[in-house]
Structure formats: C-alpha cells, structure tokens
Amino acid sequence: MLDWTDRHYRYFARLMSANALLYTEMVTTGAILHGRGDYLAYNQEEHPLALQLGGSNPVDLARCAKLAAERGYDEVNLNVGCPSDRVQNGRFGACLMAEPELVAECVDAMKQVVDIPVTVKTRIGIDEQDSYAFLTQFIDVVSAKGCTDFTIHARKAWLQGLSPKENREIPPLDYERVYQLKRDYPALNIGINGGITTLEQAQLHLAQLDGVMMGREAYQNPYILAQVDQILCGSQKAVISREDVIEAMLPYIEAHLLSGGRLNHITRHMIGLFQGLPGARAWRRYLSENAHKNGSGIEVVKQAFQNIQAEVTE
Ligand SMILES: Cc1cc2nc3c(=O)[nH]c(=O)nc-3n(C[C@H](O)[C@H](O)[C@H](O)COP(=O)(O)O)c2cc1C
C-alpha cells in the first residue's frame, strides 16, 4: 500500500505468517527504469513476495517483470485498480479497466519474458461502466492472453470527484459479483479484496473463492496475521506471541540502525501491534513520541513494551 507499506513492514508481517502472500506497494515502471533508487530491493525473508507494477507500456512492463523475476520475486501483479489522479495521468491503474486490450497486451508482454505468475488486481467497474458484462468483458480479454489469476477489489472506482481514500469507502462493496465471476470462470483463480477485517470473514470468502487479500486491516491491526497460517492454512505450529514478534524485530532494527537508518522507519509499522488490547495506547504513544528522535535505538521499543504492562496494571 503506497505510503504505508515497505520492506520493513513486510519483514514484520512475515514474522507472523509464513504462508500469506505479501505484495509490495505499487511501483511504477518509470521509477524502476529511470529512478535513482533501487525500487526492487527487499529482504529475502519476505518471500513469498509479489511485486505490484503500475504502468501501461507493454515494453516497459516486460522489462520490469524481467528485472523482478531476476531479483527473485515470486509473482508480478499489474495494478488496474488505483484511481488516483496522478496514476490516471500516467494512464495506468483503474482507468485501464476501460482498455482491456491494452491490459491484455501488457500481460502478454510480461508473460513472454518471465516464468513467474503474472497476475492482475482490478475492481468490479469504473464510473458508469459498472455492469457485470463490463467486468466479464475485461476478464475475457485479459484471460485470453493467459492471465489466470485476478484479485478483485469488490467495489467500483469513480475516476473523477472522489479521492483515493473515498474510493475505498464510498462505492458499495459487492461481494456477490465476485462470487458470480468465480462461478462463471471456474478455471480462473479469483481472489477477493475490500472490507475484510477478520479471518472468519476470510474463511467465508474462501468457501467460494481462491484467495482473500487484506489491505488496511493487515496494516492497522497487523497481529491479525499471526493466525493466518493456523486458521486459513491448517498449520499446527504455535501462534507467535506479540512479545516474540517484538523480540524477533530487535536484531532487524539494530541492523537497520547500524546501516544508518532511523528507528521510526521500522516502528511506524509496529504501532498497531497491540490494537484492541489494554495497553495499546501506551505502546502507540511511547513509540510515536520517541522513535523519531535522533539516536533512538531498540531501548525505545523495549520501554514502549514495558509501558504496556504499566498501563495494564495501573
Ligand atoms: C494507504 C493505502 C495505499 C494503497 N496502495 C495500494 C497500492 O499501491 N496498490 C494496490 O493495489 N492497492 C493499494 N491500496 C488499496 C488496497 O490494496 C485495497 O485494495 C483497499 O484498501 C481495499 O481493501 P481493504 O478494505 O482490505 O483495505 C492502498 C490502500 C491504502 C489504504
């Protein structure tokens, strides 16, 4: 998720679930091909990991997909769901739903050069084009070029007049439409996304579909990931405790600090670890007030954890 997630979040998330497929935030082909930084950097521990690409030029996308495969990504996912103005100006994201042939060409170009899966994340419609026929037309054209894996954010996007945030909240969710799609395309892998906040909800979706993608909940309440392997994947291993998650983050944080990074680059992703529990506020507040200070180290994380006990026993 742009501006929210990064490799530090994914390292943290992976400590809680070995099985969940993690996605990068959308990375544009322009950034990868012409940017100064290394936009494909990640920690090996993040696997299985999909790179989400933003773009609509088949040649550029193919180059990026090839780079991603060479760097060891497990999947390349094309973003056909982001409605922001910036993205529309670049002619990619959700507005590409109106150009299924171009999306198919992009998928085809990527599939020609990599062996890893090339997948598409999209919505159920855009603007007035929100009929089921519009969605199936899109799926028909794109799957004809060999894309077998779609994640559907179960609401449409308004390309004008709504902010990206509003486009995640205002258009109503229509899960039934995604179920219908799976019934009509049983050979395709269809995953669902949008408004899923518990693993029980995920189980209900998985009774009809092939996958469930969680966005905001997995970020704001990351400990939900701790039972994904057990509840959704049948793992028998013990659920990691929050304390053990913190413990496991400390060496990672220290290595980051030693390489010149700042504490809050990492702890900002850990703020929600105690979400919904007594003491969550003490944890959040101590990290927010201290982790950004110059020279802050892992003692801040340890103190934040101790403050939880103090708040709980007050
Ligand atoms: C801050 C933020 C950034 C996002 N960035 C991306 C992105 O880069 N790529 C993408 O496919 N979706 C992005 N999304 C959308 C989510 O992936 C997801 O489709 C949406 O939030 C609905 O799912 P949820 O209700 O589980 O959060 C973003 C969402 C948020 C809140």
Image (cartoon, helix red, strand yellow):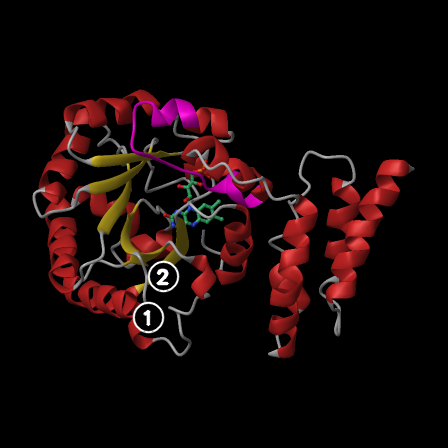
Mark 1 and mark 2 lie on one chain; the one further toward the N terminus is: 2
Is the CB–ligand 1 distance for label 2 below 8 Å?
A: no
Q: Is residue 52 positioned above or below 177 on the image?
A: below
Report the disc number at residue 151: none
**Quadrant position of residue 183:** top left
Which region shows up in magenta?
203-221
Point out the image quarter for the C terminus.
Answer: top right
Q: Secondary structure at mark 1?
A: helix
Residue type highlighted by circle 1: Ile
Q: Residue at x 30, y 23 (%)?
A: 208
* Identity of the residue furthest to the right in this view: 314
Would you name the residue on which mark 2 appears? 27
Do we see residue 289 in this rendering? Answer: no
Q: Mark 1: few, some, or many residues within 10 Å (few <14, many ≥20)?
A: many
Q: Are marks 1 and 2 in contact (CB under 8 Å)?
A: yes
Q: Is residue 299 magenta?
A: no
Residue 280 horizontal side relative to residue 32, left or right: right
Which residue lies most toward the front here?
A: 236
Q: Taking 91 as reference, is 135 above or below it?
A: above
